[in-house]
Image: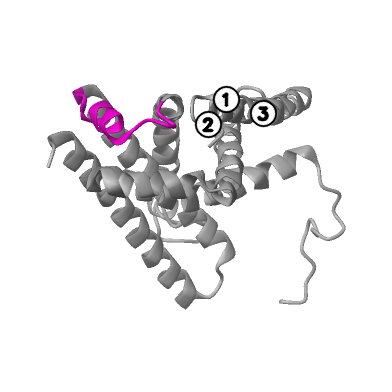
């Protein structure tokens, strides 16, 4: 039983856009779940008062945290865009192979552009360089 | 031949041992989270370097408080539903499965409570 081959056998199965985007949706979902810890940390810091809030802002401005936040921003936009793609499928629309690929590339492009626009705004905003 | 009714066979006999409840809630929270998450992301972006008083004043506005509470509940319910399936798919030992599912519920429940209490504390001012 345990020695029987898996089908499709993942080690020799050529990755396709469809399968890669599918597992990425799940991976970004897990990453975003972990990221809620940052969100909760920031929110409770606001509730605690000005000192805790200042400490949180300082921590979130640290460059390594910023890199993580940038990755998280992309995960957010990817999960959002691809989630909308999934909702269209749930409504029974967009199942033609050409449409599936077109919507897949659209999700990749849109999530990349939205992430770049977001961080261009963050870094250009007053006090952003600090 | 079987003595079970068709309904009895259909109810709870799928691989998930349950009906469409999970699927439906995942979609409903997804639909709710599209506008809520976009609004929250845009709002946060406008407050990225704001001081404490500005953030508190924003959260304390009644419509913002309500939308943030809705976002928190929808987000952590969606999180629980999604991670539940990930654990169901990848954790194979029954013991670890139960432990992971309990830890997930603890995290999602406590996370939602912390968010709600923080928002209310800021909004009701104390």
Query: The residue tagged with tag 3: helix, strand or loop?
Result: helix
Residue B48 is inside the magenta segment: yes
Which contiguous range is marked in magenta? B47-62
| Above or below A84: residue B75 | below
Residue drawn 61% across the image and 45% down it: A67
- Seen from the viewer's position, the closer of residues B33 and B119 is B119
> Crowding near pointer 2: few (<14 within 10 Å), some, many (20+)?
some
- Give residue A74's position: percent from left, percent from top: 61, 37
Question: Going from the N terminus, do you reach mark 3 or mark 2 first?
Answer: 3
Residue drawn 40% across the image and 25% down it: B43
Q: Do circles 1 and 3 both sit on a common chain?
A: yes
Residue A119 is inside the magenta segment: no
Residues tagged 2 and 1 counted as in contact (Cβ below 8 A): yes
Distance from disc 1 to disc 3, alpha carbons, whole Å, reads 25 Å
- Give residue A28's position: percent from left, percent from top: 58, 45
Residues tagged 1 and 3 counted as in contact (Cβ below 8 A): no
Question: Going from the N terminus, do you reach mark 1 or mark 3 first?
Answer: 3
Query: The residue tagged with tag 2: helix, strand or loop?
Result: loop
- Give residue A78's position: percent from left, percent from top: 61, 35
Which chain letter matches label 2? Answer: A
Residue drawn 44% across the image and 57% down it: B17
- Residue receiving disc 1: A124
- Residue receiving disc 2: A128
Which chain letter matches label 1? Answer: A
User: Quadrant of the rendered structure where residue A83 is?
Assistant: top right
- Seen from the viewer's position, the closer of residues B37 and B93 is B37
Which chain letter matches label 3? Answer: A
Residue drawn 18% across the image and 34% down it: B123
Q: Is residue B82 visible?
A: no
| Above or below A125: residue A60 | below
Which numbered dot is residue A107? 3
Location of the C terminus of chain B (image quadrant):
top left
């Amino acid at each position: 039983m345990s020695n029987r081959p898996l089908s499709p056998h993942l080690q020799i199965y050529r990755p396709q856009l469809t399968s890669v985007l599918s597992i990425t949706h799940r991976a970004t979902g897990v990453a975003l779940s972990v990221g809620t810890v940052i969100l909760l940390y920031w929110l409770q810091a606001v509730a605690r008062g000005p000192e805790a809030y200042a400490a949180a802002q300082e921590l979130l401005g640290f460059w390594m945290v910023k890199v993580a936040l940038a990755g998280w921003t992309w995960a957010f936009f990817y999960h959002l865009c691809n989630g909308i793609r999934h909702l269209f499928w749930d409504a029974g629309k967009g199942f033609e192979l050409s449409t599936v690929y077109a919507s897949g590339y659209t999700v990749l492009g849109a999530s990349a552009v939205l992430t770049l626009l977001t961080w261009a705004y963050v870094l250009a905003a007053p006090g952003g360089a600090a | 031949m079987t003595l079970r009714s068709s309904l009895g066979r259909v109810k709870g006999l799928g691989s998930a041992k349950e009906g469409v409840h999970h699927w439906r809630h995942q979609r409903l929270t997804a639909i709710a989270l599209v506008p809520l998450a976009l609004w929250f992301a845009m709002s946060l972006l406008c407050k990225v370097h704001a001081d404490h008083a500005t953030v508190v004043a924003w959260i304390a506005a009644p419509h913002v408080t309500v939308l943030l509470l809705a976002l928190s509940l929808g987000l952590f319910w969606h999180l629980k539903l999604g991670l539940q399936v990930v654990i169901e798919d990848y954790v194979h030992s029954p013991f670890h499965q139960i432990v992971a599912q309990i830890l997930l519920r603890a995290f999602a429940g406590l996370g939602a409570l912390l968010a709600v209490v923080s928002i209310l504390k800021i909004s009701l001012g104390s």
